[in-house]
Image (cartoon, rainbow, N blue to C red):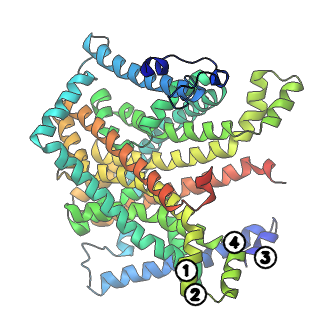
Amino acid sequence: MMNMAGAQPLARAPKSSVQKSPVPPAPRALSPRMVDIGVQVAVVAALAGLWEFGARFGALNPFLLPPLSVVLGRIWEDLIAGTVLVDLGLTLYRALAGFAIGAVIGIPLGILMARSALVRWLFDPLVSIGFPMPKIAFLPIFILWFDIYDTSKIIMVAFSCFFPIVAATYAGCSSLDKWPIWSARSFGAKERDLLWEVYLPMAMPQIITGLQVALPVGMITTIVTEMLMGGRGVGGAMIMAGRFADSVGVFAGIVQIIILGFVVVKSLEIVRRRILVWHPESRR
Amino acid sequence: MSDILAGRRRPSGLAYAIVDTAVRFSPVLVLAVFWEFLGLSGIVSQQMLPGLVEIFSAFVDMLINGDLLYNTTRSVSRAAAGLGAAVVVGVVVGLMMAQFRAARLLVNPIVQIFYPMPKSALIPVVMIWLGLGDSSKILLIFLGCLLPVVVGTYNGARGVNPFLLWSASSLGASRLDVLREVVLPAAMPDILNGCRTALAFSFILMVSSEFVIATDGVGFMISSLGDGGQYPAMFAAIFFVAGIGFAADRIYAMLARRALRWREA
């Protein structure tokens, strides 16, 4: 009974205060937001269907676009064989290790650049030259220096993540509002306390934005290093599949990478909301 | 110092700008000296870190025999084709998304799914679709640059002050007029920002696709020089590509500032 009442799209909820239903006030059945979400889910489903049936019934060449079910079947097979998790794990490890190194060097350096004239003089031009350069071009140098294994991949990723992070941290720390700093000082805060209690929290939104720029760049770089140097990982697996004209393998890789990229980027968004709970931006 | 310089206007601004830039970028010289020192003192082998003179003479050689110019033209024309198409399509799609709910509902899920995907993963896909020639790389750069432009345009067009829209239409502007005369200029800063991201992506994808699949272009040139052990030339080509990327971004930023000059009070 309750179930049926809930299933009926109650037309005017506020009016029906006469019949006190035990069902908690149901969300208005078709709010515009729900419609939007529904339509968008339907679009995704339609695309998936188009992919599947277009490829299956010959509208699209199945070599150029293998049916979705075949691609998912391949992922399932590889999942059982264990290779999917190894490849995803390696790619994730390289991307995150490089990203972490970039952050661990970039954030303190950005803060120092904002705080010390000497550091600023030395690094400001280097960062502003390095920031817009296509860092991936330096990959052969890192191969030359550090060989083709994980070290050079991770250093390459760290190098490409470093610049957005240091630039954002520097920008964030050098445009701080003076008033909170002055009032903290006048309450007797030491410089060390200021760093942790005032500078960092105030610059945090921009620092995290820098991290959010760097993370996708790090993923792009990881994939390219794997394609070039092999050594497994999703990128390596994809390029091998491409060389053997195994288009199912290539699309299996793409689907894995889409999922991996989505999870990683969304996780960082969640982290941002966690860290910045106190910040006005979270209250919007 | 920079305040004084900023206060100065042309014509004497250029000379000041040059001096200011030279002073500002002096640490690059420090880095160069450090580089030479590492190589000459034998701490790092000359193979790993060729001297700057050697790199420069390799650069001049490549410039004279035309390799560098030929490959750069090939690469840059591919990047420009992909990026240009991405900007045109991206701005149109972004504006449509902001104007029509149907377009928004149709495109948004696609953007949501593909935006976080590392675009370099598409390299094997375009290789399967279009082979090893120009078209595969143009398609890759197009796909990689499209979403930043779409998202930038959409955010800019969505954030237009509604009072501007209302007053324009109450003054009798048609929907197309409003789009062209109000929405597009108001969204311009965001559009230009999106295009700047796309420009950076176009260089990344240009170089990496040529590392992986190519028969010409600067990326191919760099990797084949590296494979052949011609390290001074490889360093020269790498610095050259990095320099082009840097220059492209700077020129773009300058043009964008100029295009937005009307916004400043």
Please identify the quarter of the rendering in which residue B93 is found. top right
Which of A10/B262 is in front? A10
Asked which secondary structure carries label 3, the reply is helix
Which of A186/A89 is in front? A186
| CA–CA distance in space, label 4 to label 3 | 23 Å
As drawn, the label of residue A177 is 4
Residue at image point 66% right, 82% down: A184
| CA–CA distance in space, label 2 to label 3 | 31 Å
Q: Are marks 2 and 3 in contact (CB under 8 Å)?
A: no
Name the N-terminal-most of marks 1 and 4. 4
Tell me the amino acid under the disc marked 2: Glu
Tell me the amino acid under the disc marked 3: Ile
Q: Is residue A85 left or right of residue B67?
A: left
* Mark 1 neighbour class, 10 Å CA radius: few under 14, some 14 to 19, many 20 or more: some
| CA–CA distance in space, label 1 to label 2 | 6 Å
Residue at image point 35% right, 53% down: A221
